[in-house]
Amino acid sequence: MTPVNPPPLGGTSAPAPASPGARPVAALPEGVRVRVLRLVHGDPRAAVEAAGRLTERQAAGLDPLPVEPVDLAPRRLSAHRREVRELPDATRLVLLLAAADQYPVATHAFQRAVAAVRLDLRPLEEAEAAGVAYATAGGVGFRDAWTRIAAYETASPADRRDVHRLLARVLHGPAETPRRAWHRGAGALGPSGRLAAELAAAAAAARAAGDPAFARALAERAAALCPDPRARLLLLAGAAADAWRAGETDRSRTLAAHADADAVTGVLALRTGSAGEAFDALLAGAARAAVPRTARADRAGPAPAGSAAHLLARAAEAAVYTGDLRRCREAVQAARQCGIDPPGVLGGLAAAVDGRYEDARDLLEATAGRCGPGGDPTDLLHAGIAALLLGDHTRAATAVVRTAAAARARGVTVLASQALEFRAYADFWTGRPHAAEAAALDALHQAYATGQDNGACHLQAALAMFAALTGDGTLCRERAAAARSHALAHGLGLPAALAQWALAFLDLGNGRYDDAAARLRALAAAGPGHGHRAVRHLATPHYVEAAARTGDTRVASAAHADYDRWARVVGSPDDLALSARCRALLTPGPDALAHYATALALHADGDRVFERARTELLFGSALRRLRRRKEARDRLHSALQAFESFGAPHCAEGARAELRALGAPAGPTRADVRPTTRATSRLTAQQLLIARMAADGATNREIAARLALSPRTIDHHLRGVFTRLGIRSRIDLVRLLADGDGP
C-alpha cells in the first residue's frame, strides 16, 4: 500500500528507464526474472514494462529492484487507474474501503465498517458491470491485484485516511490490536511518537505470531511516523529483518541500506552477496546484540535481527559457504567475548580445523542431537549440517525436513529453501536421487523467488551432482558452469567445490579416470572461495578410486590416511566402509579382497546405498581379474540392479562391461525395454517436468526460460526422454501422458 505520508526511506524514485520493452524479460538472470514476475503479481505485460525500466545494475541483480507498483510498471497501473476513475464516486468509495481492508494484509473488517456507517453497497453493481470487482460472501473481490491497488491509489489522501480510521474503529478484540494499529497508522496526518510506539508493539506481536510480512509493514510504518531519528533507524532495521524473513529480499536490501543494521546486512550478504563480507558483518552484529540493553546508547530495545547466538550461528554458515573454515576460530573467540557457548556447528568446525577430531565429534554430536520436532529453525538447520558432517544421513534428513516445517510455521520462508539445500546431500547419498532432484528444483525456484542467489548457486551445484549420477553430461556441465560462475564471483567455496566434484564424479562414472583425478587434485589445492575442505574430505573415496586407476597413489594415500582417522573417530559405518574400500584400492593383488569384504559388511549397517553399489562393482571387478568368476558374477549383477534402480545408466553400463568381460549375460539395457505400465517412472524429476511441459505445448525456448537452461539442453533432454520411453515424437509423448502413464 502506498503510505499516506512520505515513506520512511524518503520516498521511492523510479529508476532511469530504458525504453519500455527494450530488455526482454527472458534475457534477465533467472533470479531477477522470477522476482520481477513475483513483484508484478505474475502479470506478463507488467513484467515486460518492468524489465524495460530496470537500471543495468538492477537487471544484473546488483541493486535491489523497486518494490512499489508505480515504480515497476506505471503504465500498466495507469490503465487500471483510468478504469477506476470512470466509475461513479459512490462505487469508488466502496472499492476504496474494500481495498484498504485487503492490502497489504487482510484485516477482515469490511462488513463491520459497512454496517457501522450504513454504507449503501448497491453502487458495487457498477463495478461488476465494468468487470472491475464483484461481490463475495466476505465483501468485495477484485479482478486482479492491480485493480485493487488502483482502487486505493485513485482516492484522495483525505479519503484514504478516513477509511483507515473507520476500519480502525471497528476492530475491537485483543487479537485485532495489530491490525487496528496498522489502520490507525495509515490514517495519521504526520509524525507521532505515540502512534510509532503503538505500531512498534504491534510489529513485535505480529513477529511473535509468525507473520513477518505484516510485522514488516507495521515496523516500516512506525519508522515513517517516528520523530526520534535513532529509534527510527532501529525500526527500519527491524523492518529490514522482517522483510528478509518474509522473502521480500529487494525491500529488505533497500531498508537495510537506510538503517544501521550490521546483522541484517550480514544475513543479506550471506544469501545474496559476498559471504566473506557477511562473516565480518555478522560478527559485528553479534557484538552489538550481546551488549546489555541498559548499556546501549540508543536504549531502544534488543537488536531486531536476532540474538548474538543466532548471528554467530549465521557467521558459522558464512564460513561454511566460503570454505574458509579457519575463520570459525574468530567466531569462537567472539562467542567467548559475548559470554556464550559457540552455537550450532561453530565449535565443532573450529575443533575440526585444529585437528581435534575427538572434540569435533563430541561437539557436532551434541548439535546433531538437537533435532526434535518444533524446535528453532536455525538450531534445526545446524543439527542437520552437523549430522551430515558425522555421516548420519538419516538424522540429517529428519533435521532439515523439520527445519523447513518449523520455518514455514513461523513465516520464515527463506529458511525453508535453505534447509532443502542440505537435504539434497542426505537424499543423494541414501539412494533417493530422484526425490532429491525434485526437491532441489522446487527449492531452486524458491531461492530465486526470495532473492537468495547464493542458495540458488548451491542448489545448481547439487543438481549438477544429480546429473552426474544419472550420467547426463550435458546437464551436469551446464549446471556446474552456472554454479561455478556465480560462486567464483561471490567467494562461495562450497558450491564451487561441489560443482567441481560433480564434474569429477561424471568423469569417474564414464571411465575418464585421468580427468577425474585431475579435477579432484585441483579441488584439494583450491583455497577459500574456490574450494572447500569438507567437500574435499567427502570426495576422498572418489579421488582414491580415480588415482588408483591411473597408478598415482602417493597423494591419494595421504588423503586416505586423514579420511580414515576421521572415520574411526566418528564411527560412521558408511565412512568406515568407504575407508575400507579406499584401502582395498590401494592394496595390490589378492590382499585387497579382504578389505572389499570388510567394506561391504560395514555398508550393511549404513545408508549410502549408491556407494555400496559402487563398492560391489569394484569388488566384482577385482574378483574377475583374479578369476573368481562365480563370486564376481554375483557382485556385478547386484551392482547392476542397484544402478538400474537409481537411474544411473553410465554406472550400469560399467557393470555390464565387467559382466561381458566375464562372459556372463548382462540382461537388456533400459533403452531396450519398451514402455509398459508407468513407463514415465524411468524419467528423472527434471526429465518428467520437461516432458509434461512439452506435452502441454510449450516450445523448447519457453521451457528453457522457465527452467533457467539453454534451448539446446532442453532439446538434449527431450531426446533422452524419447529414448527412455521408446517413443519418437511429441505426439507419442502427449498420447503417453494422456493415457495416465505418469506419477
Image (tube, grey):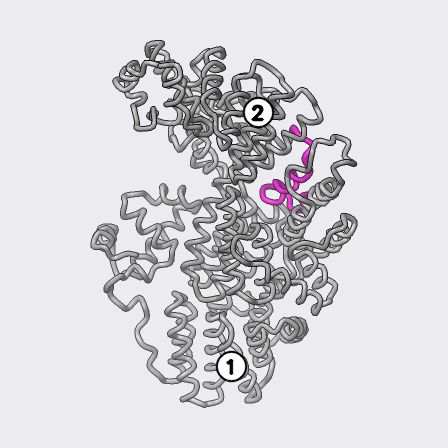
Residue 508: % across, % down? 51, 68
Asked if residue 243 lies left or right of residue 358, the reply is: left
**Quadrant (top left/top right/bottom left/bottom right) for the C terminus:** bottom left
Highlighted range, magenta: 258-278
Q: Residue at x 57, y 88 (%)?
A: 591
Per the picture, the main secondary structure of the magenta-coloured stretch is helix
- Residue 613 can be seen in this image: yes
Q: Residue at x 29, y 23 (%)?
A: 134
Disc count in the image?
2
| Occupied quadrant, residue 438 | bottom left
Counting residues from the start of the chain, the first of labels 2 and 1 encountered is 2
Is 597 in the magenta? Answer: no
Residue nearest the viewer, comparing 117 with 79: 117
Q: Is residue 306 above or below residue 232?
A: below
Can you tell which mark lies on residue 221? 2
Say which element carries label 2.
Answer: helix
Residue 183's spot in the image, x, y percent?
50, 22
Residue at the front extreme of this rendering: 173
The residue wearing badge 1 is: 601
Q: Nearer the viewer, mark 2 or mark 1?
A: 2
Q: Nearer the viewer, residue 549 or 319?
A: 319
Depicted 40 relative to depicted 531: above or below: above
Q: Nearer the viewer, residue 162 or 467?
A: 162
- Amino acid at circle 1: Ala
Asked whether, in this view, residue 480 is left or right of residue 26, the answer is right
What's the CA distance linking mark 2 and mark 1?
Answer: 63 Å
